[in-house]
Image (tube, coloured by chain):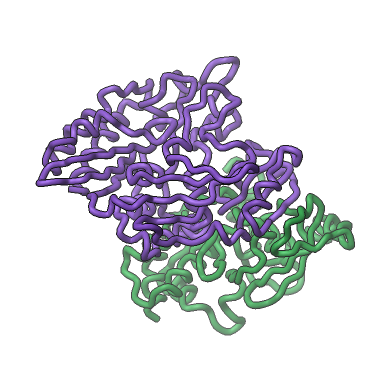
Amino acid sequence: MSSKNPADSPACAREGAPRKGFSRRTFLEGVGIGAGAVGAIGTAKPARADSNDPVGPGPVAITLNINGERQDLEVEPRVTLIDALRNQLDMTGAKKVCDRATCGACTVIADGAPVYSCTMLAIEAQGRRIETIEGISTEDSMHPVQTQFVENDAQQCGFCTPGLVMAGKAVSDRSSQPSMADVEAGLCGNICRCGTYVGVRKAVYEAARA
Amino acid sequence: MQNFEYIAPTETLSAVQALSPDAGVTAVLAGGTDLLSLMKERIETPSRVVSLRNVRALRGISKKGGGLRIGAMATVQELLDSNAAAGYKSLVQAASGITAPQVRAMGTVAGDLLQRPRCWYYRNGYGLLATHEGESLVPTGENRYHAILGNKGPAYFVNASSLAPALISLGAQATVAGPDGERTVDLADLFQIPSSESERENTLSPNEIVTEVTVPGGTSGWKTATYEVRQRQLLDWPFATASVALRVRGGKIADARVVLGHVAPIPWRSSEAEAALNGQAPGEAAGEAAGKAAVAAATPLSGNKAKVQLASVAVKRAVAMAG
């Protein structure tokens, strides 16, 4: 890390932490990140899911199904799903790390399969059932994969964790008796730089059987 | 990423029309696993993106006339899950080499075939031929993953497709739709070694799309296999791949097809390896001879001599597995 200020490093960002009231994000929005979106309201053309007419490059009205809830938003065609989630819907669980379909930190589930949300356009996420880390637990109870992450000490810095939890959930959704090889294959699209793989595999293996 | 206008037609013809040169620089979006990264790096800067996700005619995998039809937009996961494709051993093995479930879920069969080279010079903006001040950076540069065959220049990248060697060894054809209708080409002829920066590594016009890949009937009794020599078991491209298809009659190989991947700017059919196999009993000895023949004419670069041996081993093991 060449960052001079430790507070700038991803490991120090607290975006994934539960928070009430004030947050770094609401602060940033107040400072002006939200201004672009405010300026765009009223100019968007709706994007029909099956249109033979082009839309964009300006903002386009789209509808997404996130964690079972309808979300209406306006995005330029170039906006990826992770940017829509993080910057517009305030769902900052999925992490943007490599942004090149390699590291898996941005993993969400689309129609039951894990996908890299950095490499799906938000406009292309229409018509798909999207599950994010925000939707798999409640205030009172964690998803079995999350519980087993705790039990198996399966995280260190935590930056890869939301993506690994979602990839692990996809494994456990697909089979209640995955072999360790199935678990490894299901998690191989996610990289952990701290090297928590042993605990993560065990957590997913046990969560599927829970 | 440069902004663009987006269009997602429902018909193949509408998609082709949307790719008209009048629309400026266009790009075809299938699964997006390659295109979006290229756009973020500004290697691709389309002013219009034509998504194929709503074109139903491009989907599905099914048996067809004793063979197999794979829609261009069928995903790698659909290929792996397909009952119709399950008997095509070498093809399923090749698809298994695409390991990340996220890429399997989004990446498409045609997208695998038409992904751009992974050459790091290309990916860093030096163009397909990796030139700087009129000379290619590859021969004297970092070239351990580059070509060992078909590398007389000016192209040194390797074709990155996982599925092309297996499909070509099975005699597959691609159907291509353009403004004047459809044409069918041998899949091998979809690829070319570019001779200048104005050419691509495939023979499609900018307003053409691949609509489906078909494997003809007649190879069902053949023995096939794909073997990848890999640095890591998961989440990486192989050093070298070999796909073989062998017709065995009376204990001898009567007809052999050997196609290597990741060793040349195109999927590399080795007539030398095929000649070494014909008339031999299938097995490891024949495979070893074929492996040696496959790389006999290899011309490694300064940093990739190891790939010669690895490509040879890929052929040997694929033949042994098929036997």
* Left or right, B100 with reference to B32: left
Q: Residue at x 60, y 81 (%)?
A: A138
In the image as oriented, which residue stretches furthest toward the top? B134
Residue A190 visible somewhere in the drawing: no
Colour purple belongs to chain: B
Q: Is residue A114 above or below residue B208?
A: below
Residue toward you, B190 or B105? B190
Q: Position of residue B186 (x, y in %)?
A: 43, 40
Q: Position of residue A51 (x, y in %)?
A: 73, 60
When asked about the image quadrant of residue A195, the answer is bottom left
When asked about the image quadrant of residue A43, the answer is bottom right
Q: Residue at x 68, y 42 (%)?
A: B26
User: How many callouts does the rendering have?
Assistant: 0
Colour green belongs to chain: A
* Left or right, A91 with reference to A156: right
Residue A54 visible somewhere in the drawing: yes
Q: Residue at x 39, y 25 (%)?
A: B150
Q: Is residue A7 above or below residue A171?
A: above
Quadrant for the N terminus of chain B, please.
top right
Q: Position of residue A177 (x, y in %)?
A: 34, 76
